[in-house]
Image (cartoon, coloured by chain):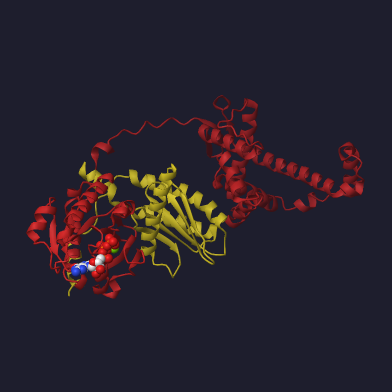
Amino acid sequence: MKDEKLRQRRLVYYKEDIDQIDKLLDEFIKLSGSVAIFLIDKDGHLVTQKGTAPSIHPETLSALVAGSFAATKEMARMLGESEFSVMFHQGKKENIHISLVGERAMTATVFDTQTTAGMVNLYSKELMTKLEVIFNIASKREAKEHSLQSGYSDSVKDKLEDMFKE
Amino acid sequence: MQINYAKKEVSCKLVYYGPGMSGKTTNLEVVHQKVPDHNKGEMTSIATEGDRTLFFDFLPLDLGKIRGMTTKFQLYTVPGQVYYASTRKLVLQGSDGVIFVADSNADKIEENIESLKDLENNLKEYGVKIDELPVVIQWNKRDLPNALPVEELEKAINWLNAATTEAVAATGEGVLPTLKLAASLILERLNSKEPGAPTSAKAKVAEPKEKKEVYVANINADKISRSYFNQYCQIQYRLATKSNDVEDFKKFSTEEKKKLLDSLINYVLLLQDSKARGIQADKDHVETQVKSFGRKFKSQEELDDYLGRRRLTLDNLRNEATRNVIIGMVIKNVLPNIDQRLKISSKEVAEYYESHKGAYGDKTYDQVKSSVVGRIKATRKKELLQEFFMKLREKSTIEIFDSNI
Ligand SMILES: Nc1nc2c(ncn2[C@@H]2O[C@H](COP(=O)(O)OP(=O)(O)OP(=O)(O)O)[C@@H](O)[C@H]2O)c(=O)[nH]1
Ligand SMILES: [Mg+2]
């Protein structure tokens, strides 16, 4: 029981899922004419990204996006909406479009004047449906034999020791 | 925690919790200062002007590749002030461990207790029991003259029996040992409780017996199942209907169904034939068609509304576009003399005009000439296609199971 709970909280992504997801994201970028897309889980971890936005630090973006999405979720709750599924921030040159993927994740799409919000929205709706399918399959898949090498934790501790030498 | 076997990456989330002004942000700043550059990203703070945390501080740490896995810690602080309760809870979501920064100041004992209870409650709302999560309590501000002795703090606050450290975050003392301790606790977790023990009870749930497929037609090597055909019918209806009152499930007469099956068979034949000839619908071409369909609508909302009412997806549109593109290509490739056959003499036009005069009202021959040409061409094209499909059918094996339709 405890393990089951832990498993739900621990997000495990396997290669076959990410490969499929990466393919969808690549296609999305091409079709929508976006600059980059980041798939982020609700806890703020970056899952995968496609395209290039050199000015963006992916981890920081992930934390901010997950945080602001969680905040809008609260706002939605106040309004009696179950949640807002899309958020859009418009800049002078670059824009960001954030969209919820089911319960567990969200995408952040960076785009510029090469395309329009409408296009991004249109293709991201389709992308969300496809991603949800993959997520659903992935979440039902039986957890695989764990393959972090033995001694992994100890090695991390050694590394921390080394890093934190004062 | 995220374990990403595709990116070979482990990412843990660690949250600094505690009452307002206890020194959470200071802890993070110290970590930021002391960790080597290549192991850290920028520190991001969403704070008020007075440096009080408004939403969170964030600092990503990258330990590099360890036994094949790039290992990352994402450090967050919550806002300690009482009235930021809801944001505090949001930041806590999915955390793998907590460093509770307690203020040793004798006047702050109640605030510490309140905050720890608040932590316990918020975790509970995420379905996490606090004693199942790695928690380190840091007795901070040990330098204060009115700091309570650690034994007293223990007694008053540490009812969890959590691991503890002492610190003076303002000078950096004790900050890294606290982080190291919390990280080790998280990692020990990873050792002892691997996810992945197969949950056999769940796995044994019997799959529903596979339903026996019923087929409506065999076309050469391809079979069309009834469920696929039914779906095809519904989608054709939704694509074609002009009305905005779209029926959830359109019922068709046998006659209509036979017609639809006929069109589906043609499509399958077309696909088989084009495949054999190595003709493929160009993806860009298909997308262009889909986009030009989208442009027929005044706004994004209108398109959304149109598709939404019809429960159509872009893929449905793409399939239709693909069919059109292939038809276009096949016409060009398979019927090379098409232009010749589509040449229309002025005599034909005149004859058509004469026999359909009624339909053109009082418009003169010159006024309608081009539209007449278009009309004749369309009819001719249809005939040619029909002819093409007839030929395909002649050399194909087609079985139709009427009783299954
Ligand atoms: N004397 C003393 N002061 C400290 C210590 N650690 C932090 N402070 C001071 O306490 C004040 C508040 O510190 P912050 O790190 O901003 O506190 P916080 O917990 O992030 O506060 P919120 O963001 O409002 O929740 C600052 O003025 C710090 O300099 C310490 O060990 N000793
Ligand atoms: Mg702070």
Q: Residue at position x 29%, y 75% from top?
A: B37
Depth check: give the residue in front, B304 or B240.
Answer: B304
**Residue B402 lies in what quarter of the image?**
top right
Residue B363 is situated, as x and y percent measured from the top left of the image, at 90, 44
Which of the four quarters of the rendered structure image does ligand 1 lie in?
bottom left
Foreground pick, A90 / B47: B47
Q: Which chain is yellow?
A: A
In the rendered image, which quarter contains the C terminus of chain A?
Answer: bottom left
| Relative image position of residue B283 (x, y in whole percent) | 57, 55
Q: In the figure, B203 relative to B277: above or below? A: above
Task: Indicate whether B348 appears above or below B237.
Answer: below
* Residue A27 placement, left or right of A3: right
Residue pushed farthest top? B403
Query: What is the residue that sits farthest to the left in this orientation?
Result: B151
B275 or B1, which is in the foreground? Answer: B1
Query: Which residue does the image show at 37% across and 31% down from the upper left?
Result: B209
Q: Nearer the viewer, residue A21 or B88?
A: B88
Quadrant (top left, top right, bottom left, bottom right) of the N terminus of chain A: top left
> Chain B drawn in what color?
red
The number of discs equals 0
Quarter holding residue B218? top right
**In the figure, B405 relative to B275: above or below?**
above
In the picture provided, is A160 more to the left or to the right than A11?
A: left
Q: Vertical placement of B399 versus B119: above or below?
A: above
Q: Is residue B286 left or right of residue B166?
A: right
Q: Work out whether residue B242 can be spotted.
A: yes
- Residue B158 coordinates in the image, percent (x, y): 13, 53
**Relative image position of residue B347 (x, y in whole percent):** 90, 46
The reply to whether residue A143 is in sight is: no
